[in-house]
Amino acid sequence: MRVLRTPEERFANLPDFPYEPRHADVADGLRMAYVEAGPPDGEPVVLLHGEPSWSFLYRHVMAELAAAGLRAIAPDLIGFGRSDKPADQAGHTYARHVEWTRALLLDVLDLDGFTVVGQDWGGLIGLRVAAEHPGRVARIVAANTGLPTGDIPMPDVWHRFRDAVLKAPVLDIARLVQAGCRNELPGRVLAAYDAPFPDESYKAGPRAMPGLVPITPEDPAAPANRAAWQILTTLDRPFLVAFSDGDPITGGMAPILRKSLQGAAGLRHPVIKGAGHFLQEDAGAEFGRQIALFVTST
């Protein structure tokens, strides 16, 4: 597997992101990056990003969690941020991303009793880790995400996004993030989303991810996701559904999660107002406060 590593100087002068990068070796000889905030002995909260962002997305959320005395841990998925980037799309599979993330959280960091927060692909991966290792997870937060099995059709807007990513001659990462936000992002923030990708050769991860979402029942990832659904529906861990009020791609999943999962029963599930798909950008501080309240009250 040919692997690229973004030069560290690409990450100089990131706005509101003072966190020192940490690195760990995971499966397939790859190096995975992550950042932390808050007291080292605080209750751990893992923040998993999605397509095509990186841990920078959670900078405002991390500040709120740290202020609440929690240990915020935000990894960069393989292929994103400061993590190693397999140069070929074929190097990316759903199963590999689950395993890479599991290895970081459970083997390297040896987390126990942690809260997993997943948005976009962070949910597709985080929900699998939680379902497959429920004894290590204390709580789950799903935000603008889901766990598709291919048994329910994806919305047309998602198919248009998938086609655009697969066919674009030049994949404009910052533009994709901006398109998922309601607020206009400053130039320095847009540059931070472009930082991990010096040129097109580094973008195999963002290119591959839409094609890894199970959209037919026969998809190779569908059986594992169905098995995870079966576990999650009866799992007694508190499960918070914290979606924004403006995500056309995943918004329909919120009522399904609230109704289907035992851990969601009896909780007050917030709707993050005035936010798009990337609610961490549009309302990061509010999202962080809702996570902190959930963790400290359950």
Image (cartoon, helix red, strand yellow):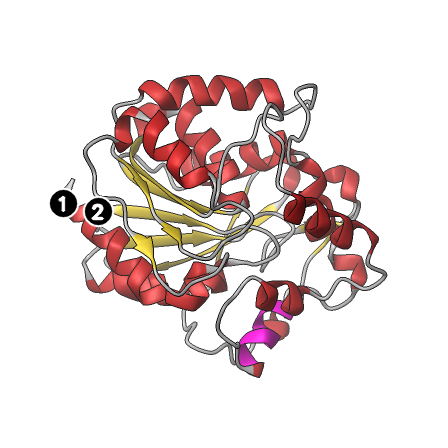
Mark 1, residues whose alpha carbon is within 10 Å: few (<14), some, or many (≥20)? few
Nearer-the-camera pick, 35 or 279: 279
**In which quadrant of the rendered view does residue 257 lie?**
top left
Instruction: Pick the quarter of the image with the N terminus.
Output: top right
Nearer-the-camera pick, 70 or 232: 232
Q: Tell me what residue is drawn at x 67 percent, y 63 percent.
A: 6
Q: Tell me what residue is drawn at x 34 percent, y 48 percent.
A: 242
Q: Main secondary structure of the magenta part?
A: helix
Look at the numbered discs 2 and 1 and tell me whether their residues touch, using CB distance below 8 Å. yes
Q: Secondary structure at mark 1?
A: helix
The residue range painted magenta reads 188-194
Q: Residue 24 at what x, y percent from top left? A: 51, 47
Q: Which residue is mark 2?
A: 294
Q: Tell me what residue is drawn at x 51 percent, y 37 percent.
A: 125
Instruction: Pick the quarter of the image with the C terminus.
Output: top left
Q: Which amino acid type is shown beneath numbered disc 2?
A: Phe
Q: Which amino acid type is shown beneath numbered disc 1?
A: Ser
Residue that protrudes farthest toward the right in the picture:
169
**In which quadrant of the rendered view does residue 235 lie?**
top left
- Magenta-drawn stretch contains 193: yes
Nearer-the-camera pick, 164 or 51: 164
199 on left or right of 48: right
Q: Is residue 128 above or below residue 115?
A: above
Q: CA distance from mark 2 to mark 1?
A: 5 Å
Q: Tell me what residue is drawn at x 43 percent, y 17 percent.
A: 230
Q: Which residue is mark 1?
A: 297
248 on left or right of 262: right
Q: Residue 114 at what x, y percent from top left? A: 30, 39
Q: Residue 27 at what x, y percent from top left? A: 60, 35
Q: Residue 171 at what x, y percent from top left? A: 76, 62
Q: Secondary structure at mark 2?
A: helix
